[in-house]
Each structure stands twice: as C-alpha cells, then as structure tokens.
Image: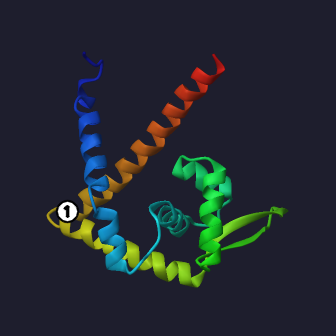
C-alpha cells in the first residue's frame, strides 16, 4: 500500500502511539487522584473544554468538541451542575437558550487537574525549545481541526449516498 504523499508516511502509526500513550492504563486515574478529583473521564473532558473556551458554550458545541451526541453531554452536565461545578446561564442572543459555564468551584477543580497534566508535559518536553513547544501546539491543533473537518465530510457524504 502506498501513499501519494510520502511526507505523511508513518503519520497514522505515530498518532496511534500518541493515543495509546495518553490512554495508557491508569494515566487518567493517576492524574485525577493527584488533583484530588473524583469524576469520570467524560465529566473532566467537559470541564477542560469549558476551561479552554473563551466564552460559555451551548450543549451542542460541547458535544461537537467531544465528538459525541448531545444527550450524552446533557447527562454529564446534570451531574456537574448538581456538584456545583458548572452553571447554566442565559444566552444573550437567545433568551430561551442556555449556555454552560464553569462556576468558581469548577474553575478551581479543573485548574488542579490541568496543573498536574501540564506539569507532566513540561517535564516530558523539557528538552524542547519554547518555539518547538509552541509549534507543536499550533500544528497539533491545526491537524485536529483539519482532520476532523475532512472526516466529517466523508461521513456526511457516506450518509447522503
């Protein structure tokens, strides 16, 4: 099997290695324990998404970023709201709709988790220049965005056939 673009040879195996490394064994459990958090992975993922957003988000936006369906996110949000880690606020553009944002307790909790994770990345990439680290974040973000958009097009095309 060959590719028309030799520059991308080996990309899929390397991406699989990254996925396996991040999903390895007790990594999530180790990070949450170190941060003093007792939440499941989907709930933590939602908190990370909200923390990294520059504004409150709609449920659909969270679901899209997680690449799951809305009802799955709604169930998680209900639990996070009961724990007072998120809150629903009016959408200024549509008073019937609600946006999701972190509460101060949610910000504190996810801040602890991100501190643990960021320390791991800082240690692992300590030998990298700051420029290389910035390039990695930029290119990885670009890869995820472009690959997600392209794969969504393929799925959409398949469903309309």
> Taking the image as drawn, is residue 87 in sight?
yes
Asked whether, in this view, residue 69 is left or right of residue 3, the answer is: right
| Quadrant for the N terminus in the image | top left
Percent across and percent down for residue 87 are: 67, 74
Asked whether, in this view, residue 60 is left or right of residue 135, the answer is: right
In depth, the one of 33 and 46 nearer the eye is: 33
Residue at position x 29%, y 34% in the image: 12
Q: Secondary structure at mark 1?
A: loop
Crowd class of label 1 (few under 14; some 14 to 19; many from 20; radius 10 Å) = few
Asked whether, in this view, residue 146 is left or right of residue 93, the answer is: left
Residue at position x 25%, y 52% in the image: 21
44 vs 104: above or below: above
105 vs 127: above or below: below
Residue at position x 60%, y 28% in the image: 156
Which residue is tagged 1?
A: 129
Percent across and percent down for residue 44 are: 47, 66
11 vs 55: above or below: above
């Amino acid at each position: 099997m060959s590719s028309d673009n030799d520059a991308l040879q080996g990309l899929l195996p390397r991406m699989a290695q990254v996925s396996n490394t991040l999903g390895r064994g007790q990594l999530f459990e180790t990070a949450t324990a170190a941060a003093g958090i007792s939440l499941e992975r989907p709930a933590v993922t939602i908190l990370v998404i909200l923390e990294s957003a520059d504004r409150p988000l709609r449920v659909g936006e969270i679901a899209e970023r997680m690449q799951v369906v809305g009802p799955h996110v709604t169930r998680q949000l209900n639990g996070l709201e009961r724990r007072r880690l998120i809150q629903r606020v009016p959408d200024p553009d549509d008073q019937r709709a609600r946006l999701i944002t972190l509460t101060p307790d949610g910000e504190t909790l996810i801040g602890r988790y991100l501190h643990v994770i960021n320390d791991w990345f800082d240690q692992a990439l300590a030998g990298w220049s700051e420029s290389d680290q910035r390039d990695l974040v930029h290119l990885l973000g670009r890869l995820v965005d472009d690959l997600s958009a392209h794969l969504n097009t393929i799925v959409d095309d398949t469903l309309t056939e």
